[in-house]
Image: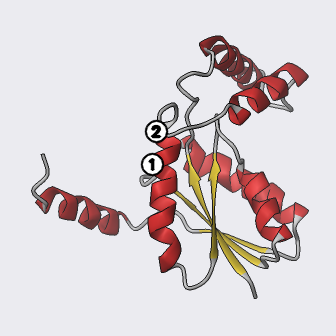
């Protein structure tokens, strides 16, 4: 069994991505959600693709750079599982794209872990589980597991340890 882990972050628009692209994209998403959901329009899909594909550097997307640093720290702790990174919005690859890459590389078990720590957020509680349900149907021979919600006492211990450090 070949294992992969996908670390999912929120994602952020690149600082130099034109604001009008992001504003129009969010307006279209909001209109679709207010109308009960459904498939994105061709314009929404095109705008999302442009925003996600915008060239990234640590300077124009410090969020992505930070998530990649977290991934680099996590990777050696995974007992040989391949680590991939995905983003909920604004940035590529998507969760679906990361799962497809893992499967293409031979993964038969994929564990998905979000960087969102607490319950109550739509990404961790709704969007990722819905995406995983669709992906399970697309990849029935692959075991897809969601490593969430987190043990909040463990998260609290992490925060307490950070607070105990002498940081400015």
Q: Do the residues labelled 2 and 1 touch (CB within 8 Å)?
A: yes
Q: Toward the viewer: 97 or 125?
A: 97
Horizontal relation, residue 59 to residue 95: left or right? left
Q: Which residue is drawn at 46% across and 39% down?
A: 62
Regarding residue 149, the answer to whether it shows in the image is: no
Horizontal relation, residue 93 to residue 149: left or right? right
Q: Toward the viewer: 145 or 75?
A: 75
Q: Residue furthest bottom?
A: 1
Q: What element carries label 1?
A: helix
Horizontal and vertical percent position of residue 70: 45, 59
Residue 12 placement: quadrant: top right
Q: In this view, does 126 lie above or below 82?
A: above
Screen quadrant of the N terminus: bottom right
Q: Residue at x 65, y 11 (%)?
A: 20
Residue 138 placement: quadrant: bottom right
* Mark 1, residue position: 66
Q: In this view, does 144 lie above or below 126?
A: below
* Mark 2, residue position: 62
Horizontal relation, residue 41 to residue 93: left or right? right
- Judge the density around disc 2: few (<14), some (14-19), many (≥20) Cα neighbours within 10 Å: some
Q: Toward the viewer: 153 or 60?
A: 60
Query: How many badges with numbers are in the image?
Result: 2
Horizontal and vertical percent position of residue 25: 71, 20
Q: Which residue is drawn at 86% across and 32% down?
A: 39
Horizontal and vertical percent position of residue 123: 59, 45
Q: How far apart are marks 2 and 1 (CA)?
A: 6 Å
Q: Which residue is drawn at 57% across and 29% down?
A: 14
Horizontal and vertical percent position of residue 77: 48, 78
Q: In this view, does 69 lie above or below 46?
A: below
């Amino acid at each position: 069994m070949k294992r992969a882990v996908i670390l999912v972050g929120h994602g952020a628009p690149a600082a130099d991505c034109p604001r009008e692209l992001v504003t129009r994209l969010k307006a279209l998403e909001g209109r679709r959600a207010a109308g009960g959901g459904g498939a994105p329009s061709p314009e929404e899909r095109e705008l999302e693709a442009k925003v996600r594909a915008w060239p990234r550097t640590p300077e124009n997307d410090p969020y992505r750079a930070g998530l990649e640093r977290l991934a680099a720290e996590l990777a050696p702790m995974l007992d040989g599982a391949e680590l991939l990174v995905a983003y909920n919005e604004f940035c590529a690859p998507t969760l679906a794209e990361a799962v497809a890459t893992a499967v293409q590389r031979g993964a038969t078990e994929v564990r998905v872990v979000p960087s969102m720590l607490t319950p109550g957020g739509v990404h961790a509680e709704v969007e990722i589980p819905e995406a995983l349900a669709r992906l399970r149907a697309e990849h029935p021979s692959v075991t897809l597991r969601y490593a969430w919600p987190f043990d909040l006492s463990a998260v609290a211990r992490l925060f307490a340890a950070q607070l105990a450090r002498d940081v400015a």
